[in-house]
Amino acid sequence: MLRVLGCFAVVLFITTTVYSLKCFNCENRFNPACGIYFKPYQFKAHPCPGPDYKCALQRQTSKDGWVGIVRICYQLGSLNGINETNGCKNWTNVMLGYTAYYCFCDTDYCNSAVTIPQLNIIPISLLLYVLIV
Ligand SMILES: *[C@@H]1O[C@H](CO)[C@@H](O)[C@H](O)[C@H]1NC(C)=O
């Protein structure tokens, strides 16, 4: 009986910890609220289907200036040759012939805000500096 309970606890532990990364899944092509000015309250973050996933955000500007944003559970290895460490990078898909900006992260809901460039820290600290001095 204890053993059965133990197994149950282990299974519960695995399913709740390993498989529970939650990411937003949306495209601004279908819902503008998924765009740069993301409105997370309009979306439900879904648990990713397996342990080998990260949250990802893809931003791609097309020739006519449209900025496409895609937020997904990203299965590691899906994009051949991309560096999947956390953070953002421009990456060219040689096979399909396009370049896009990709961000990867591995905490719940983290692909809600990763489009904001880290450069934003500079104007904020400048502003604080100006206000304080
Ligand atoms: C991926 O990027 C990280 C950080 O930019 C770097 O430390 C790492 O060496 C890179 N990995 C590969 C396989 O290029």
Image (cartoon, rainbow, N blue to C red):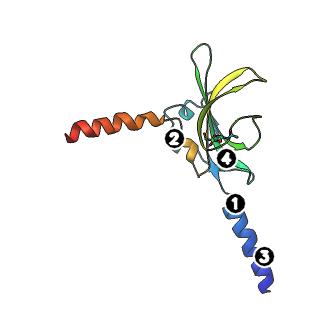
The residue lying furthest to the bottom in this view is: 1
Res. 7 mark: 3
Amino acid at circle 2: Ala
Query: What number is the disc on residue 54?
Result: 4
Circle 4 crowding by C-alpha within 10 Å: few under 14, some 14–19, many from 20: many
Which mark is on residue 30? none
Q: Is residue 30 visible?
A: no
List the single residue furthest toward the left.
133
Query: Disc 1 marks which residue?
Result: 18
Measured as percent of width and height from the top left, residue 47 is found at 67, 52
Q: Callout 3, which amino acid?
A: Cys
Q: Residue at x 78, y 76 (%)?
A: 7
Residue 26 position, x and y percent, is: 63, 37
The disc, 1 or 2, on the residue closer to the chain's N-terminal end is 1
Could you tell me the amino acid type at mark 4? Lys
Give how far apart the Cα atoms at labels 1 and 4 are.
12 Å
Question: N-terminal of the two: label 3 or label 1?
Answer: 3
Mark positioned earlier in the residue sequence (2 or 3): 3
Residues at marks 1 and 4 touching, judged by CB atoms closer than 8 Å: no
Q: Which is more N-terminal, label 4 or label 3?
A: 3
The local secondary structure at tag 1 comes to loop
Residue drawn where x is 21% and y is 42% of the image:
132
Q: How far apart are labels 3 and 4 at the CA level?
A: 27 Å
For the residues carrying marks 3 and 4, which lies nearer the camera in this image?
Answer: 4
Is 48 situated above or below 95?
below
Q: Is residue 60 above or below residue 1?
A: above
Q: Which residue is mark 2?
A: 113
Residue visible at 71% across and 48% down? Answer: 53
